[in-house]
Amino acid sequence: MTINTENSEESRLLENKVLFGEIKLKYSKWVAYTIVMLIVFTQCYSVVSSISIMNQYAYYAFMNEKYPTRNTMQTVGGSDSACTVNTSKVEYKQQIIVQKLTSEWNIYCALAQNIPAVFISMNLASYSDVYGRKPFFLVPLIGTFLKNLACSLGIYFKIGIQWFIGFYVIEGSTGIWASTLSMAFCFVADTTMPGKTRSFVIALIETSIGLGAIISTSLTGYIIQWTDSYMYPEFLSVIIVTIGILLAVFVLPETLHPSRKRDDHVSICQNMRNVTECYTSEFSPLSKRWMFILLIFIFIMSAFGNLGRPNVEQIYQMNSPFCWDSVRIGWYAAVRNLAWSFGSIAIIKLFHLCTTDDVIALVGCITCVASAILEGIASTDLYLYLGSIFAGVAAVEVICNMGASVSANAIYDATIDYYKGMTFFVMAGYGGVGIILCLLFISEKKRTLSDVTPKAAETKCLPTVQANIDRDIIPLIIDIVIYRAAEIKCLPTVQANIDRDIIPLIIDIVIYRAAEIKCLPTVQANIDREIIPLIIGIFTIHPILYRPAEVKCSTTVQANIDRNIIPLIICIVTIHPILYRPAEIKCLATVQVNIDRNIIPLIICIVTIHPILYRPAEIKCLATVQVNIDRDIIPLIICIVTIHPILYRPAEIKCLATVQVNIDRDIIPLIIGIVIIHSILDWAADIKCLLTVQVNIDRNIIPLIIDIVIIHPILYRAAEIKCLATVQVNIDRYIIPLIIGIVIIHPILYRPAEIKCLATVQVNIDRNIIPLIIGIDIIHPILDRAAEIKCLPTVQANIDREIIPLIIGIFIIHPILYRPAEIKCLATVQVNIDRRLSL
């Protein structure tokens, strides 16, 4: 089935996105993802390994520089003889001085590396939209290569430790590891559609980061001990990152399609303004800016309590009372990284079973405090490992790296004389502030939600709808808006976890009697192993808020789409009617559905729903019709398209894009339906034209030049109605002249005084002639006040021996769009395809 995939993303940054099928890669996509994961792994290994090595080497170098007569040869091998526990000895005081010098050196290195990195990493991703992805994969890799190579040479030639600060400037000037990670995510976004694949690839990339950290920290200690040198493990990190550079240059494919390259060159200053835009009052029209800023402060407190710890921890562990060697330091770092990378994911999943994200954030801050206090009072190895495991829940991304490292080393330097664990108590204080802010956020959020709760005299609730999106159940709390009040406040934002890209459906703008209703962004549903609920359907549920005397609901319809059951609550369609008469209503964007070979077009069911658009005393439902035409289906374009226009009588209606239908060579051209949909909107003062609709039937493209200008005048009391030209459709070698059938249907929208009968319509269904006279008799009385209407010639449809005359159903819909004194209903039509048909 050919599906139109235009306008899948309407974001300004992604409006020219080319889907994966249009990007020609040199390898299969999974080979390309493996290459990206190896690149990320090599840089992560090199960065983490170098941090551990240089921290220990700085301590060794300062000890050798300040006290050259002391036996420091064994320090490289990790012997405990260089660590003195007795505080009364001279060696213990020497350790204190060396620890101070190492902390100060770490401060300078953190500033030298992170100050330029802040500006560089912020702009690399933006410039990759102009020049491509590959060059900006290379920039941070080359920076890490040059810095680690300079450090290994500096260790070999025993250059003064102060000169190493300049090496950190080199790496910071190329964007450090964070830029490589952002390029990896750009690569994934270029080559995947939203869904399970993208989620899985992002998870693999994050796993490669954790593996790089774990392997490097556990291996580095052994290499230092075996070689009795810091130069060899540092040079090994150079070799590892070189592999990443070679992969990026010779193997990694370019994924930025030429059509997506931006021509506008955004300046660095403009990028900085874009970053700070979220703090302005215009960013959140719903006055939620305070929540965002509060969450940022919680994040900063958590980051300060965790990101500055690794450097201080190693100095802390190398001295009394622990006196750890390089191997034990490496294993401790590996356990900590394992807890941060994998343990936190498992614990968060476990917490999600019984609590919310707010509580998880609070628990994360509490564990941050607990781990820091345990480490501060630690006197044995067990306390240190307990602190590491507690900190795993509170792990956050490295975004406050510079401030956390500088403050941690500065505090350690200032407090080492009287209590070395004071630094960790300060970090616990950061977490304590985070706990207070979390409690404040939770209480304010509850208060805000209580203000949103409807206070109307009568409130009716829809049952909770659960959508299975990528195996995550999202309960849509619809209970909040369904009531008849003069003013309806916002629903909480509904978030759909679609391939880890959160689509916030801002339903804050609910359907009520407002002067303006805003639009949801275009939703693209990829149904074929990736179930994405039709958001428009869900959105339209809220409109039911309206005030009909009584509205009955159709039963839930389940569509079997690629073996996954999607409950399409048909009340969803009933909902548009709901909108009643606001001053202005804007249209939702077009929805495109990729239906994988099997689908049940519930046309009659949906048809039954539209009558609710109005206030009839009683509405009966038709039975569900199931259609399977040569294993391919009639796409529910009518259903999808009808939703938007039927909204009521707006002053202006915009057009939907061209619809293309290709249904396995045999098709029922529901041209009437497609045109009816747009026309049923009512009598608008100005109605624009639809684009040409093309139907690919039996490999012949038939442009149905339906000049809507002719049709729409029929929607109201036009003085003159022109005729459409004869449309010929080649369906299985039979010519079906559908002469002006459309013109007859639209007039049904209001009350005629007298209408003459059309000739009998005959449909050839599997060699049986069925005159559908009943449908014609009922329709025409509903037509217009025209003085004279001419008859259509007989229409014969022979569609591969299987056809569903949905004419009756279509006729039923439109009369209800209006308030006639009396409307008669046709009986339920059940169609037994393959040689049986009953009325």
Image (tube, rainbow, N blue to C red):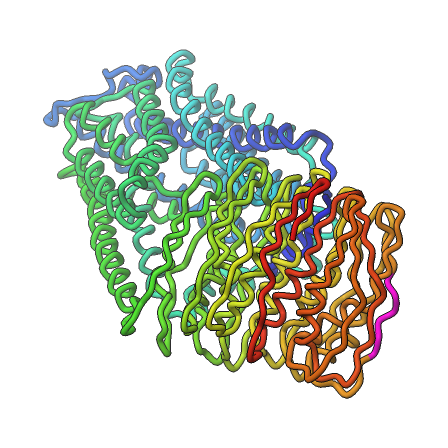
At which x and y percent is residue 74?
31, 15
For the view shown, which residue lies furthest in the left direction? 88
Q: Residue at x 49, y 62 (%)?
A: 540
For the view shown, which residue lies furthest in the bottom direction? 719
At which x and y percent is residue 441?
26, 58
Q: Which of 84 and 537 is in front in this view?
A: 537
At which x and y percent is residue 493?
40, 59
Q: Can residue 171 be seen in this view?
A: no
Q: Which of 201 and 586 is in front in this view?
A: 586
The magenta-colored residue range is: 722-727
**504 versus 752 height, above or below:** above
Q: Can residue 142 be seen in this view?
A: yes
Image position of 112 (left or right of 131) = left
**110 versus 158 height, above or below:** below
**15 versus 742 height, above or below:** above
Which SS does the magenta portion mostly show? loop
